[in-house]
Amino acid sequence: MGPVYVTSLSSGMQCAVLSTASAVSYCALSTLAGTRFEPPGMAGLAHFCEHMLFKETERRKSYHINNRLERLGGEINAFTTKEELVLHATVLREDLGKALELMSDLVFHSVFPQNEMIKERDVILDEIRSYKDSPMDLIYDSFEEKLFAGTPMATPILGIPGELSKITSRHMKQYLGERFIPQTMALSVVGNITPARAILLAEKYFGIGAFSEKNPCPAKMTVSVPTSQSASCFDITEKRGTYQTHCLTGSAAYGLHDKSRVPLVLLMNMIGGPASNARLNMLLREKYGLVYTVEASYAPYMDTGFAGIYFGTDGPNLSRCRELTEKVTTQYARVPLTTLQLERAKKQLIGQMSITEDNHEVQCLSMGKSLLSFGKVISHQEMISQINAVTPGQIMDVALEIWDTSRRGTLVYY
């Protein structure tokens, strides 16, 4: 596996290619078209657009879209986040061109038929209702609504039922017309293909001709969005009738370009990462048997982020769990890690990251996000260097800031 090749297509869209020896190829079209870019009063527009892209184009009915790659043994899918709308496909290496052509058709020729919009809106409303049956997921959305109140980051990805009902095909065409432009899109390819051949295919379907076919490439667009670092703290308990008591505590955190981002990643991994030896798992679950699930997560966005600790427990154990969680976060803020502790933590994070990087689909998606966020693909070695550069003082500084009670929020469902 060689280095990642990065270039700009004739349209101005950035493209990254990683050559492998695999029989399977992956491609992803990542676009800054997520929830935070929706017009006011149109909550859920981005996610609704994601669904409708697969319903019909000028050239294909939904049946033909669904069968185009699946009958070849491949698949195409999409997802929406607070900042991105991503189309991605997995195919045999000889079918990569077919995947790129289909993506191009969905992006440039979708027609959003009214009858399909009515059906798909009902599907999304059902998705929202089913989501509310999962308090572990719902509490994160509710928390960010409160944490980022007054900014686009507070909008739930699935949308708000009353606002979804107002969305028409005209709104979709206008929104995607504004967002599906070269300056806000990136194409990533991972597979058994040379960079030169991959770029030829990318040019064919996403070069200047593809964009000018629908509308001329507009001038470079800058997006201004408010930051949320000043979000006020809160401590809210809501009766939800859940069997368990669910608790999420956290605060606004660092954006993707902040120098404190990597120290925070390392800290959160030590506190409650996926490994069974994470500090809170060892304390709340293994030592005291108070929880089944406890996790610490960090989601960095362009200009802000969210860092939080979640656990589910029996009601009578809530106070004890909160007390132990506070003890752990306070210790990291007040007591510096020893050289050995820090080296072990770095080794563990690098190992986890390396295992994840071995998944070519994850690599492909990661390359697209990196292009959108940094204008380049941050290499694995670069990330290792950044992790190895973290000092005990930096860990204490981020712990002190992120877990400061004067800026932290807590939400409890019971």
Image (cartoon, rainbow, N blue to C red):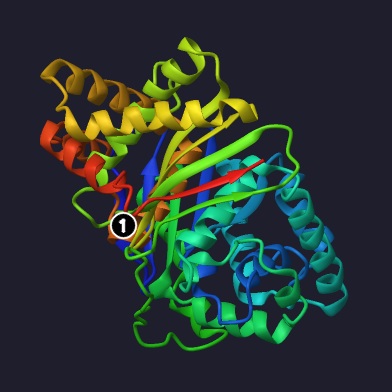
Density class for disc 1 (Cα within 10 Å; few <14, some 14-19, many ≥20) is: some
Q: Amino acid at mark 1?
A: Gly
Is 235 in front, or is 182? 235
Q: Position of residue 308 (x, y in %)?
A: 43, 43
Q: Position of residue 259 (x, y in %)?
A: 18, 51
| Residue lying at 57% horizontally and 82% vertically, measured from the top left | 40
Q: Position of residue 410 (x, y in %)?
A: 48, 47
Task: Using the image, determine if residue 194 lies above or below residue 246.
Answer: below
| Residue lying at 34% horizontally and 82% vertically, measured from the top left | 220
Q: Is residue 312 left or right of residue 284?
A: right
**Can you identify the residue that label 1 sits on?**
255
| Residue lying at 25% horizontally and 40% vertically, measured from the top left | 399
Q: Position of residue 38 (x, y in %)?
A: 55, 76
Is residue 58 among what the camera can see? no
Instruction: Determine whether the residue tagged by mark 1 lies in a helix, strand or loop.
Output: loop
Is 376 in front, or is 132? 132
